[in-house]
Image (cartoon, rainbow, N blue to C red):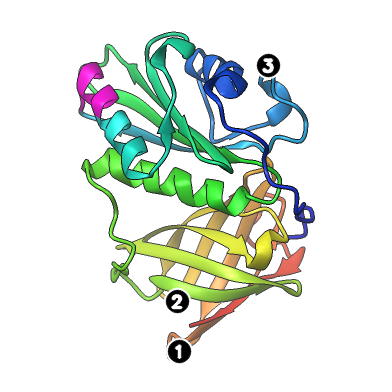
């Protein structure tokens, strides 16, 4: 999916003041995973979109905020002063190229859960790092500990890391399968295109999924696994129709 080309210009600076406006906007909003940079006050059009991992967790507000702090520290991010974040329900941090924020919104539902959004964004050319950061923080918030980068999921035939190619663009696709549910993320070599996430249902050797790029693009696709499980062939489109072909999406182990 040729969404755009990489810029080789890294993000400049990472101070709390620079990102304060972003954190204020995020903490005060009801968020979806693909906010556009132009929707956030104080963010220029060159700032990439936030990638968000939404979760519902059985945590009290104080416990959620403490776990968010530990997640940011585990990700080796420099923490921002909480006073720069409006609303008191978020913690943020940054490194040279990526900034992140974790919001904790307490509900009054009977199940007594907290809505959590682990989000990250990178400067031009660092979008892949932002996606990885969001997934790292999301996993930490779910379990309370850093994910093991060496652990490879083994829940179904689509599990694992694949070398993929979409219309000539090469990259990697990491999938985790639990029963029929398949989730994961993709990124392209050298950051040449926008990375994103996938979420779908597998029926034997066929996976029908939705994809979403960090630039707000989205659509659906279908992958068909070979009998020996070493490769797949498929297609993607920007529609909700799993059978519509706009491009190819193939992969190998």
> Residue 72 placed where, x, y %?
36, 36
Magenta highlight on residue 63: yes
Cα–Cα span, label 2 and label 1: 8 Å
Give the main secondary structure of the magenta stretch. Answer: helix
**Residue at the spot x=35%, y=25% of the render?**
115
Disc 1 packing (10 Å; few <14; some 14–19; many ≥20): few
Magenta highlight on residue 169: no
**Residue at the spot x=30%, y=16% of the render?**
106
Residue indicated by mark 2: 205
Q: Nearer the viewer, residue 6 or 156?
A: 6
The quarter of the picture where residue 242 lies is: bottom right
Decide: is 148 above or below 10.
below
Residue indicated by mark 3: 41
Left-right relation of 45 to 152: right
For the residues carrying marks 3 and 2, which lies nearer the camera in this image?
3
What's the mark number on residue 227?
1
**Residue at the spot x=77%, y=59% of the render?**
2
Left-right relation of 135 to 142: right
Q: Earlier in the sequence, mark 3 or mark 2?
A: 3
For the residues carrying marks 1 and 3, which lies nearer the camera in this image?
3
* SS under mark 1: loop
């Amino acid at each position: 999916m040729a969404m755009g080309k990489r810029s080789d210009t890294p993000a400049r600076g990472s101070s709390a003041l620079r990102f304060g406006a972003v954190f204020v906007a995020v903490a005060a909003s009801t968020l979806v995973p693909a906010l556009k940079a132009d929707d956030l006050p104080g963010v220029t059009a060159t700032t990439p979109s936030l990638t968000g991992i939404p979760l519902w967790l059985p945590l009290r507000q104080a416990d959620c905020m403490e776990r968010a702090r530990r997640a940011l520290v585990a990700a080796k991010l420099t923490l921002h002063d909480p006073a720069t974040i409006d609303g008191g329900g978020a913690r943020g941090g940054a490194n040279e190229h990526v900034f992140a924020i974790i919001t904790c919104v307490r509900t009054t539902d009977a199940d007594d859960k907290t809505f959590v959004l682990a989000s990250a964004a990178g400067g031009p050319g660092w979008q892949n790092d932002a996606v990885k950061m969001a997934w790292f923080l999301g996993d930490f918030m779910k379990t309370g500990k850093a994910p093991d980068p060496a652990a490879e999921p083994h829940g179904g035939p689509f599990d694992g890391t694949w070398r993929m190619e979409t219309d000539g663009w090469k990259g990697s696709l990491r999938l985790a399968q639990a029963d029929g549910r398949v989730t994961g993320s993709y990124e392209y070599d050298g950051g040449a295109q926008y990375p994103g996430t996938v979420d779908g249902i597998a029926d034997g050797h066929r996976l029908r999924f939705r994809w979403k790029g960090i630039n707000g693009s989205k659509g659906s696709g279908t992958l068909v696994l070979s009998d020996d499980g070493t490769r797949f062939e498929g297609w993607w489109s920007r529609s909700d129709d799993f059978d519509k072909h706009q491009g190819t999406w193939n992969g190998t182990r």
